[in-house]
Amino acid sequence: MSTNQNLAKNVKRLRETKGLSQEKLARLADVANNTLIKMETGENKNPTLETLKKVAKALEVSVNDLIK
């Protein structure tokens, strides 16, 4: 499985585990809702490190946890 597929799967799984909607997570991470949707669907194949850091922080995990 590619890193991008892992990222999409992990973001969605972690978000759902925390009971967050995409919109709520986007607000917590201070990223556009559309950015988060594209991360979860794998459409955004190369999110910036800054975006990854913001999403990881909002989910209370490391960036490594998102991409492994």
Image (cartoon, rainbow, N blue to C red):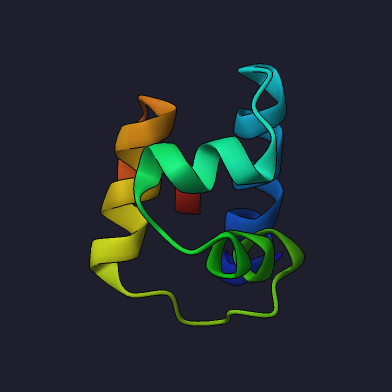
- The structure residue drawn at horizontal position 30% and vertical position 35%, both measured from the top left corner, is 57
| Nearer to us in this view, 58 or 63 | 58
Q: x, y (%) of residue 43?
A: 69, 80
- The structure residue drawn at horizontal position 47% and vertical position 53%, both measured from the top left corner, is 67
| Nearer to us in this view, 41 or 29 | 29
Q: Is residue 55 above or below residue 52?
A: above
| Nearer to us in this view, 36 or 1 | 36
Q: x, y (%) of residue 27?
A: 45, 43
Q: Is residue 55 visible?
A: yes
- The structure residue drawn at horizontal position 76% and vertical position 66%, both measured from the top left corner, is 41
- The structure residue drawn at horizontal position 59% and vertical position 79%, both measured from the top left corner, is 44
Q: x, y (%) of residue 21?
A: 69, 34
Q: Is residue 29 above or below residue 67?
A: above
Exactly how many numbered labels are in the figure? 0
Q: Is residue 2 visible?
A: no
Q: x, y (%) of residue 29?
A: 37, 45
Q: Is residue 37 left or right of residue 27?
A: right
Q: Is residue 63 left or right of residue 47?
A: left
